[in-house]
Image (tube, rainbow, N blue to C red):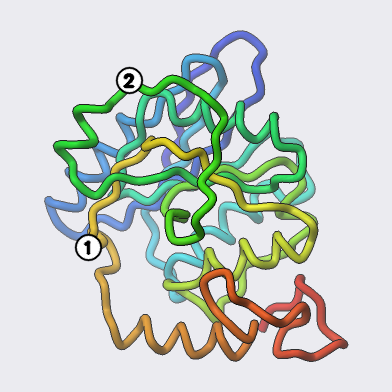
């Protein structure tokens, strides 16, 4: 793991995971762009870059990161995808929004898929605190977690190594009484086709079946309050 720090006064510190399995020049280039985009004018940030390959892909690299801080002192945890780019105000706006919404446990960032449009609006946003209300607008590519969320919600479920791993965790947050929110302004660029794990329809459908089996629905239509409708299990349960 490579660690980099940027410090400012005694503001809360955000630990940032940058998963970056680099196998070709394109992935190296997009990782460099992502890393350079991670800035804060108001907080201390610490970037932890993980270049390891994991059997359970996304879920395992996140859990490895979480396990380093579970039960220890930290202010905020942030995870980014290495095929994204963050607006220079994204982190500061995200922390401000989390502080204004005490019921929230996680905040994600509204994305633009067109890079040219993203560049035109870069750094131009004015914070207004308005939240995305449409579930379809919520994008889990990059997120910030409040302190103690990982202790309350528990570990990542490796049933979902790639697709739905974040959706499973956000729904578990909801069951734990912690909302998923997102500012209704573009603060992130994310391509329509993932630059890391691709967009396998077969893998997506397999994950969808598993997710629906676990929670009785998808995309905000989950019906179960207990995994697999088993009342002996709660939101911390993982296989």
Q: Which residue is mark 1?
A: 193
Q: Are marks 2 and 1 in contact (CB under 8 Å)?
A: no
Total label count?
2
Where is 70 relative to 45, above or below? below
Q: Which residue is mark 2?
A: 124
Where is 222 relative to 89, above or below? below
Q: Is disc 1 surrounded by few (<14), some (14 to 19) or many (20+) residues within 10 Å?
A: few
Pick the front one: 18 or 4: 18
Q: Is disc 2 surrounded by few (<14), some (14 to 19) or many (20+) residues within 10 Å?
A: few
Pick the front one: 64 or 149: 149
Q: Is disc 2 placed on a helix, strand or loop? A: loop
| Rendered residue at 26%/61% (across/down) | 194
| Rendered residue at 64%/37% (across/down) | 76
Please identify, in this view, whether the residue under mark 2 or under mark 1 is nearer the observer. 2
Pick the front one: 42 or 158: 42
User: Can see residue 1?
Assistant: no
User: Can see residue 27?
Assistant: yes
Q: Position of residue 51 (x, y in %)?
A: 36, 53
Q: Position of residue 49 (x, y in %)?
A: 42, 44
CA gap, disc 2 to disc 1? 26 Å
**Residue found at the very far right of the displayed protein:** 232
Q: Which of the 4 quarters of the picture holds residue 220?
A: bottom right
Decide if residue 205 is on the left or right side of residue 107.
Answer: left
Q: Position of residue 210 (x, y in %)?
A: 53, 88
Decide if residue 206 is on the left or right side of residue 197.
Answer: right
Q: Is disc 1 placed on a helix, strand or loop? A: loop
């Amino acid at each position: 793991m490579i660690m980099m720090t940027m410090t400012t006064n005694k503001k809360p510190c955000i630990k940032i995971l940058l998963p970056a399995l680099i196998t070709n020049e394109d992935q190296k280039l997009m990782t460099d762009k992502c890393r350079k985009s991670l800035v804060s004018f108001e907080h201390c940030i610490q970037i932890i870059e993980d270049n390891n390959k994991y059997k359970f892909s996304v879920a395992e690299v996140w859990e490895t990161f979480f396990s380093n801080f579970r039960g220890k002192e930290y202010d905020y945890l942030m995870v980014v995808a290495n095929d994204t780019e963050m607006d220079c105000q994204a982190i500061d706006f995200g922390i401000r929004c989390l502080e204004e919404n005490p019921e929230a446990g996680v905040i994600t960032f509204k994305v633009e898929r067109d890079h040219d449009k993203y560049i035109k609006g870069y750094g131009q946003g004015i914070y207004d605190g308005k939240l995305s209300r449409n579930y379809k607008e919520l994008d889990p590519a990059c997120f910030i977690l409040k302190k103690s969320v990982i202790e309350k919600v528990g570990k990542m479920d490796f049933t979902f190594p790639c697709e739905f791993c974040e959706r499973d965790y956000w729904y578990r947050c909801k069951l734990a009484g912690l909302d998923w929110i997102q500012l209704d302004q573009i603060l992130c660029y994310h391509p329509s086709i993932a630059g890391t794990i691709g967009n396998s329809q077969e893998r997506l459908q397999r994950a969808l079946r598993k997710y629906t089996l676990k929670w009785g629905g998808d995309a905000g239509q989950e019906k179960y309050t207990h995994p697999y409708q088993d009342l002996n299990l709660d939101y911390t349960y993982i296989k």
